[in-house]
């Protein structure tokens, strides 16, 4: 049993190396950080993460160091930090071996894989309860610090980032008081698809200043379909990072929304334009930068940090379950999260812990008091076909946005 002295200045390392495109869970490190600082006021806390999540933790005054698992010199940096205790909230083979090689004396983690033998303080991982939020899955690991309560995460912005986000929005919209931001980024195949998001954007942009957010390839793909969405233009798109991998838009994903809404030749034309956009990436980048050249110079902050500052100004953020959805609530923005209702992904487990969060599922607006009869995502019977997440009509979401959320 580890004996912890709450008055000692421990060097603690929290570990979650899930990337932005795989999981939203790394953002919960901010909640564990807050709990640790309350339990151990003299401790120094550092993070070991994937570099794609780094911008979510910038300017946090309570983080001593941020180490990136995909940095070639990460082993030396961790050795030099003289870490006393590592806590692997989410473990992987590479991160667990890294902690062992770094010579960290106390390595805490769940005993769930063969490589877990390298933890010298192992906790047996219990089967995840579909009704327990994943943010609380770390409580058994934090028990050694006598932590029993975890609060929602908080993200910090500096004055420069706030100022530049306002300048950016002023360059795009004459009035952005009711800004709506749509983030289709998906970390699961069972997500609301991009076609529905673009339909939402097309309708909402008639009444509200609106941005659709994606990485470089996603946004250029969306722009290739502008002929199908007459109310959208380049000013409605925001690229948060040009470096992330293309988010797997396969031909199967281009299945038409309905036979009477998009004709086959339009889909084929859009797919060809998307392929051309990817092949001619340098040319597309120049086109994407045309509108950015009219915007204020934001070169001194990353696009992701600029996006976070923009989200703090949003009246509403609409998104799949992803890190940006949770970041929005951490920035006190109102959100509408679109979730499936299955055992592996559902609002009980994954929804933001915020009073400003409205969660929509195929069963309707989520209420914690609702029954937890999960949908079998693998069953293709007539009973489940009607409650697939992509059967949520965009018109219903538009009605919820206009008549419920924005009028509250």
Image (cartoon, rainbow, N blue to C red):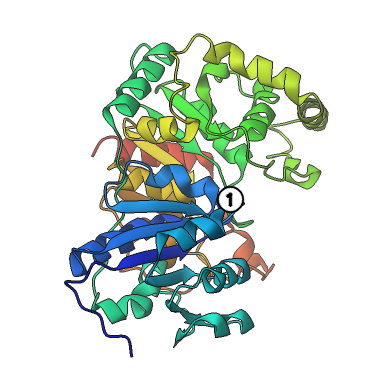
Circle 1 residue: 71
Looking at the image, residue 141 sits to the left or right of residue 389; the answer is left
Q: 292 or 62, which lies in front?
A: 62
Residue 246 placement (x, y as % from top left) = 69, 41
At horizontal 28% and vertical 53% (from top left) the residue drawn is 354
Q: Residue at x 47, y 23 (%)?
A: 205
| Residue 36 sits above or below residue 254 on the image | below
The quarter holding residue 184 reads top right
Q: In terms of depth relative to the viewer, which is nearer, 401 or 322?
A: 322
Picture coordinates of residue 163, whole percent (x, y) = 31, 22
Quadrant of image for the C terminus: top left
Q: Secondary structure at mark 1?
A: loop
Q: Is residue 237 above or below residue 339?
A: above
Report if residue 25 is visible in the image. Answer: no
Residue drawn where x is 32% and y is 37% of the image: 403
**Quarter of the view holding residue 317:** top left
Q: Find residue 113 and report its horizontal and vertical position in percent.
A: 60, 81
In the picture, measured across the screen, residue 365 lies left or right of residue 203, that is: left
Residue under the image location 54 percent in, 44 percent down: 393
Whole-percent x, y for residue 312 in the image: 32, 35
Residue furthest out toward the bottom: 1
């Amino acid at each position: 049993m580890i004996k912890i002295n709450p008055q000692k200045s421990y060097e603690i390392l929290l570990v979650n190396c899930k990337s932005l495109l795989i999981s939203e869970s790394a953002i919960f490190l901010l909640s564990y950080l807050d709990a640790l600082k309350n339990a151990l006021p003299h401790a120094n806390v550092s993070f070991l993460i994937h570099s794609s999540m780094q911008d979510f933790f910038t300017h946090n005054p309570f983080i001593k160091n941020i180490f990136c698992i995909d940095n070639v010199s990460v082993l030396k940096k961790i050795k030099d930090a003289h870490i006393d205790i590592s806590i692997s909230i989410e473990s992987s083979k590479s991160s667990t071996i890294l902690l062992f090689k770094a010579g960290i004396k106390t390595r805490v983690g769940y005993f769930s894989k063969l490589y877990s033998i390298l933890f010298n303080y192992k906790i047996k991982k219990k089967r995840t309860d579909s009704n327990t939020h994943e943010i609380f899955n770390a409580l058994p690991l934090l028990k050694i610090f006598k932590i029993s309560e975890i609060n929602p995460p908080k993200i910090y912005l500096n004055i420069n980032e706030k100022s530049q986000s306002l300048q950016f929005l002023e360059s795009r919209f004459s009035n952005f008081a009711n800004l709506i931001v749509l983030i289709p980024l998906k970390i699961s195949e069972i997500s609301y698809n991009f076609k529905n998001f673009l339909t939402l954007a097309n309708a909402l942009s008639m009444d509200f200043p609106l941005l659709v957010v994606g990485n470089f390839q996603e946004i250029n793909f969306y722009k290739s379909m502008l002929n199908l969405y007459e109310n959208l233009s380049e000013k409605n798109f925001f690229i948060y990072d040009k470096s992330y991998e293309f988010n797997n838009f396969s031909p199967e994903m281009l299945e038409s929304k309905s036979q009477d809404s998009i004709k086959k030749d339009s889909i084929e034309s859009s797919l060809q334009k998307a392929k051309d956009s990817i092949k001619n990436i340098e040319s597309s980048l120049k086109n994407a930068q045309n509108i950015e050249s009219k915007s204020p110079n934001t070169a001194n902050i990353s696009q992701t940090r600029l996006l976070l500052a923009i989200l703090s100004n949003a009246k509403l953020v609409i998104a799949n379950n992803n890190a940006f959805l949770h970041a929005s609530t951490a920035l006190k923005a109102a959100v509408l999260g679109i979730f499936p209702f299955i055992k592996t992904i559902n609002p009980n487990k994954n929804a933001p812990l915020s009073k400003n969060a409205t969660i929509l599922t195929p069963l309707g607006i989520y209420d914690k008091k609702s029954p937890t009869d999960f949908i079998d995502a693998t069953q293709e019977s007539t009973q489940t076909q009607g409650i697939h997440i992509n059967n949520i009509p965009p018109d219903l979401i538009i009605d919820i946005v206009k008549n419920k959320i924005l009028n509250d």
